[in-house]
Image: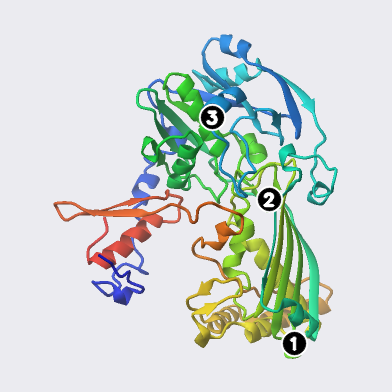
Amino acid sequence: MAVEIPKTIADFPNSGSRFIGKSVKRIEDPQLLTGKAEFIDNLVLPGMLHCAILRSPHAHARIKLLDASKALELPGVLAVVTGEDALAWANPGYTLPVGWGCHCLATEKVRFVGEPVAAVAAVSRYVAEDALELIEVDYETLPAIADPFEAMKPGSPLLFEEKGTNVMLARKFTWGEVDAAFAAAKTVVSEKFRWHRLGANPLETFGVVAQWDTTDGTLTCHGAFQSQSHMALGRAMTFSLPSNKVRFISHPHGGSFGGKGGFRGTEIASMLSRKAGGRPVKWIEDRIEYLSAGAGQAWDRHYEGSIALDADGIVTGFAVKLVDDLGATGEAYGAVSCAKPLASFTGPYKIAAASYDLTIVGTNKLPTGAYRGMGPPPHNWVLESLIDQAARQLGVDPGELRRRNYIPKDAFPYTIPSGNEYDSGDYVAALDTALAMSKYPELRAAQAKARAAGKLFGVSVVSTIEPGVFDWNAYAIVGAESTGVPEAVTVSLDLLGSITVRLGFSLEGQGQYTVVAQVLADYFGTTPR
């Protein structure tokens, strides 16, 4: 039976907002405020072992010899895994772009400083760390490449020799008559932009407790997973397990910001548990691991951007050329951040023609991953900077130039050149509200006075669209074989009339559980508790 999904509160069966948009007590807070929330490092299971990971000191090297026999002889060590175990028990990780990845432990060579080479499970983290020093690895160092433009040149060192290139993906998208827009333009503004690699740094690093049931082949993982269903599906693919044999349980986060991938660590801890006869294995990423070898680095980008404007200051064309340094592999899904800007490529502006020339390049750096919005912020920075430069060149107030180019309120729903549809908006009203709240004329007057006195005084006007969901563009552009992030909620009603919701995402601090309770309470005409 088809069910029509309500679009607004007024469409709910029990219409009228009693909880949505109202100030309510957060249902997450009692556990957090009383200290009873079980973060991943608080979890202790019977017989639990602790994992430490040996990492490559080289950016690019071939592994000639790896001998872990002495580590296994250390009292308290229960298991050691190497690339040989990964070859025997696991598949290469799923990547974006597809086919640019490797196993969770290096097999023939390492491609970045910090890549896992071997791992130990022992009765304590101290013993496990000591055991790492007993593992002998003989490396043959290879030329490393750190510049994406050098990496694209013929004859540069190759990360994956079988590929014959370091260019992971090259695609140009053109929507509308871009060349004609620039040829007819009264004004063209062009600029190069460099967005340097950066990353999150939450209070809590990534952690996981993995347990492989050697009886029925079930894998259970507790962890600081940001998207546990997604992680579980990926590990089912890695270990060739049916999805019903993989169970991932997310614990509250001590911060995330997208930087808690943990793919390799989860797989390594899982293999150690299997090798240790099913005993649970805990791995807590330390701060150095997080900074140098985790999934917290993102956005290493080189942009060339241009906008075309007519005599009235209307933007008629927008062109972006991006060279993205993804790092050594596509394992951390950093390429999605190159694609997600398509969801709001032209921002809030009515721009008829646009193009996106995208090149994703591999270098001997840590693979980039998810971070704060998954890609649009650097793209927005390029577009907004060009609008600002155009305003200065035309002698027009930057707020006024934006107002001229906004998508009109009566044009919604509006399809942008890259194909995504905006459902609604009143950008002029939003700008007017922001300018009034900030006392914009007074700010400009104060700026003029300060500059006349030789002082620096900046005033910024920025308009961006933040995509609320992942759309198909974010995956299709980078050659994904699936679409969307497989997260969902399950709503059930028991015999006592209580409504229970099971969520596919973790508690991260923003009150998501409270929001879900508010929505369902208004929908069903009940009270959250």
Crowdedness of circle 3 by 10 Å Cα count: few (<14), some, many (20+)?
many
Give, as a three-letter code, the residue at label 3.
Answer: Ile
Q: Is residue 180 left or right of residue 27?
A: right
Residue at mark 2 to residue at mark 1: CA–CA distance: 37 Å
Contact (Cβ within 8 Å) of mark 3 with mark 1: no
Above or below, 172 relative to 121? below
Up-down relation of residue 520 to residue 119 (above or below): below
Q: Which residue extends farthest left?
A: 495
Q: Position of residue 274 (x, y in %)?
A: 46, 23
Location of mark 1 (residue): 310
Per the image, label 1 sits on a secondary structure element best described as loop
Residue count near mark 2 (Cα–Cα under 10 Å), binned few <14, some 14–19, many ≥20: few
State the image coordinates of residue 108 (x, y, percent, origin top left): 69, 28
**Which of the two labelled residues, at mark 3 and mark 1, occupies the earlier sequence position?**
3
Q: Quadrant of the C terminus?
A: bottom left
Identify the residue shown where x is 34% and y is 68%: 20
Between residues 167 and 263, which one lies in front from this camera angle?
167
Give the residue pinned by disc 3. Answer: 268
Residue 520 is situated, as x and y percent measured from the top left of the image, at: 29, 62
- Residue 66 lies left or right of residue 509; in this view the side is right
The alpha-carbon separation of the residues under discs 2 and 3 comes to 26 Å
Q: What amino acid type should be assigned to the residue bearing mark 1?
A: Asp
Three-letter amino acid code of the residue under disc 2: Leu
Residue name at image x 66 percent, y 75 percent: 461
Q: How many marks?
A: 3
Q: In the structure shown, which secondary structural element does the residue marked by tag 3 occupy?
A: helix
Looking at the rendered image, the disc whose residue lies closer to the viewer, 2 or 1, is: 1
Q: Identify the residue shown where x is 80% and y is 50%.
A: 152
Residue labelled with disc 2:
198
Q: Quadrant of residue 445?
A: bottom right
Is residue 105 visible in the rendered image? The answer is: yes
